[in-house]
Image (cartoon, helix red, strand yellow):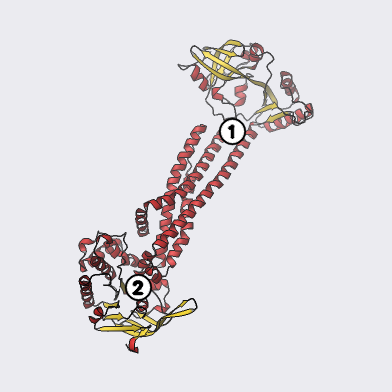
Amino acid sequence: MIESLRLAAESFRSNKLRSALSLVGIVIGVASVVTVTSIAESGTAYLKEQLEAFALDAIQIYPGWDPAGAGRSVELDAALGADILRKVPGAKAVLPRASLPGELRSGRNSASAQVGAVGAPYFAAMGASLELGRGFTAEDEYGRRPAIVLGSELARELFPEGSPVGRDLLLRSGEVASRFEVVGVLAPKGGFFMDDWNRMAYITFAYASERISGGLRPEALTVVASSREGVLALGAALERYFLELTGSPEAANVITPKEWAESDMKMTRTISLILSGIAAISLLVGGIGIMNIMLVSVAERKREIGIRKALGATPRHIRSQFLVEACLLTLAGGGLGLGAGFAAAWAAVAAFKWAFVASLGTAALAFAVSAATGVFFGLYPALRAARLDPVEALASE
Amino acid sequence: MSEAIRLEEARRHYAMGDTVVRALDGLSFSVEAGERIAIMGPSGSGKTTCMHLIGCLDRPSSGRVLVGGQDTAGLDEYGLAELRNRQVGFVFQQFHLLPRLTIAQNVELPLLYAGVRPRERRRRALEALERVGLADRSAHRPGELSGGQRQRAAIARALVNSPAILLADEPTGALDSATGRSILELFGEINARGTTLVVVTHDPAIGEGFPRVIRLRDGRLEGGAA
């Protein structure tokens, strides 16, 4: 075995360029498999984390779309909210949500941002936690107080020097400019299927609709379930409620957060499966490259094989020599591919702002697959070498 | 003395398309252990095929070939490889050293296939190289040696496993005559220590130096007697 390794190393040294080129296929194959699976795993881990952090007891209602134009979309106004609370069992609160474009200024720092106009318990309902200060209170809402909560990134931009809580800023939206007091800063949170929390600012819906934009209509309603277990039943009850109200199943979009995240996860899994399949094809091509180079090597070294046989090498000796050579090639390719794949996945994952998950399973898989590729595609050339007739092999040039 | 080699009505026929080539057509002779013989004949006489049979690289189509008392007909590829490894040392006209290996590594090869441990292999390879006067060239590669030195290295490789038979195929064919003479002298010394020597050649000048010559023509003994 050690002898075979030494012989294989010897053979690579004398055929550096060829060995390196035949590796490329395996490197690309393994790298693409590792990249795809690592990105998929990191993404799934991220989605899982999101799902857990996400409030599981809030349901979003978006305006529907009626393709026939027969029914109309529901108007997501305060009256509807009150009606839902009265008629739909299991609904604890209905919170309006809208957004406005805004220009924020604090001293010499300014930034433009989406400004969310939300009901007071919105952050709690969405499972968003605060890094500094507090969220909105009922007093903020009913008193129409000019209170504002900032996303973490936005807070750093506007107040680079220390805590913004208790400080003033100027918000201009459309024709209206008003002064707000920063009451809280949200903890950083990834935004994948949600708005980018970190770059948003939030004020109360009541203030926005009365003082900034008259007649501001909610773009969505957040319905909070009275219990976490009841959230699915609440979703179904809401569907029924809208069907009864409008006569059309398309008039409103009722989305539970679980559904949302799960459909995302399913999609990630499907995409990664498809990409892995494509990557596996490149591995196959790499394997065929190895087979080709091994067949060339056997043909070129026919006389060497004949000499070795004349000196007492059995078919098994010859077979293992070529098999070890093929496996070393593919394992080297697998190692390089694993490194390249992890690097590529790490870069991609960093761009998505996910946490990188370097799984041992993927690494083990890469090595197993490349060793198996070596055995599988090296076996035929090795068997051919082992079966060579020594007389014929010795006579070859 | 015991028999080193025995051929009984050995035939080797090849099918070449529709025709059958009778490379050996009923050859019988035997060689005693420690003997020194030359096998001679023009090209196409069957001497190379005869060498392949004695060297266990090939088996007869019919008849018997015994090497060291063992009938090769009953052996599979593994059995032949082992017999070859144990009984026969080959010396070829073109030396057949592996160019990527050092001289010492080349000489070690038969021991490698016999399953000898690395330290012991190295020791015995250096010993064999000493015998042929090449101890100081052990770390060189074949390309760095002269033709005569390469053939000496090949002889060291053939001897390293202490085989009963040294089988040389035109061993001086690629060498100038002075170097060729020194190689034949080396063969003489090796034979004097008890190794059976079989040299296959078409060169009558070489044949003259041997006490016994087996002459082949058309796959049989010339004149029909041994």
Left or right? Give the position of B87 relative to A371: left
* Image coords of residue B91 (percent x, y): 29, 71
Quadrant housing residue A91: top right
Q: Residues within 10 Å of mark 1 (few under 14, many from 20)?
A: some
| Image marks 1 and 2: residues in contact by CB distance under 8 Å | no
Mark-to-mark CA distance, 1 and 2: 71 Å
Numbered tag placed on residue A51 in the rendering: 1
Q: Quadrant of the C terminus of chain A?
A: bottom left
Q: Amino acid at mark 2?
A: Arg
Left or right? Give the position of B161 relative to B20: left
On the image, numbered disc 2 is attached to which residue?
A: B84
Return the chain for callout 2.
Answer: B
Numbered tag placed on residue B219 in the rendering: none
* Image coords of residue A161 (percent x, y): 45, 16
Please determine whether, in this image, residue B193 is positioned above or below residue B101.
below
Please determine whether, in this image, residue B45 is positioned above or below residue A164.
below
* Image coords of residue A346 (percent x, y): 47, 37
Circle nearer the viewer, 1 or 2:
2
Quadrant housing residue A114: top right
Q: Quadrant of the N terminus of chain A?
A: bottom left
Q: Residues within 10 Å of mark 2 (few under 14, many from 20)?
A: many
Return the chain for callout 1.
Answer: A
* Front residue of A100 and B29: B29
* Front residue of B152 and A359: B152
* Front residue of A216 and B218: B218
Q: Amino acid at mark 1?
A: Leu
Dot 1 and dot 2 within a common chain = no
Residue A381 in sight here:
yes
